[in-house]
Amino acid sequence: IFGTPTTINANTFQDELFQHGIEQSRIITQACPELATQISNDPEGSFVTARIRHWVQQALSQLTAGNSGPLLVFLGCTHYAYREKLFRKSFMQEGYSQISILNPNLVAADSLRKIVQQDQGADKNQSPDISLEFLSPYAIPEDEIITLSQLLKPVSVETAAAFQNARISPELLAE
């Protein structure tokens, strides 16, 4: 499980796996401090490539001798999925070609799609008529807008456009 320090320390994913019968010894967690921000600020990915390789090496160093065979790799931060190919490449460079990468962004997007379709009474073969708007409680630095837009565009042109035209809404931080 790769995630931010907050995600890893919350133990949410680890606890869920343990409750479903996965032995604690089979769960390897790797906190990746600052990686999400680094992904946001590295449009070419050269710096991030080295950082991901570092975190993959750190995670692999936790493998015990009995852990062989295919690995399941969970990308526990939305930003990490934007660089899924770099994670895969890093594992391959370390000699692990049999990996399955679990990208929760895809499941979350599919879940939201189903909610929208149910709300609109649409059938699953019909594309729902929705519009996207990106709201942020603070101004997003220009470098992050450029990088994340580039990473979002191949996944969803509409989402990238919404992100580029973000509306600042400080009231989102109000309690």
Image: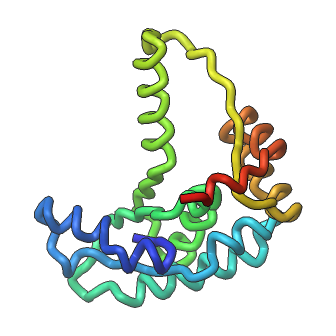
The answer to whether any part of residue 165 appears in the image is yes
Residue 64 higher or lower than 100, as above or below: below
User: Which colour assignment does the render follow?
Assistant: rainbow
Image quadrant holding the N terminus, namely bottom left
Q: Quadrant of residue 28?
A: bottom left
Q: Position of residue 95 (x, y in %)?
A: 48, 76
Residue 8 higher or lower than 108, as above or below: below
With 80 as the anchor, is 76 left or right in this view?
left
Q: Residue at x 43, y 80 (%)?
A: 30
Residue furthest to the front: 175
Q: Position of residue 14 (x, y in %)?
A: 27, 70
Q: Residue at x 49, y 43 (%)?
A: 106
Closest to the observer, 134 or 44: 134
Q: Position of residue 80 (x, y in %)?
A: 58, 63
Residue furthest to the left: 21
Q: Position of residue 139 (x, y in %)?
A: 81, 60
The answer to whether any part of residue 85 appears in the image is no
With 97 as the anchor, is 54 left or right in this view?
right
With 175 as the anchor, is 96 left or right in this view?
left
Residue 14 higher or lower than 82, as above or below: below
Q: Residue at x 40, y 18 (%)?
A: 118
Q: How many marks?
A: 0
Q: Residue at x 82, y 56 (%)?
A: 145
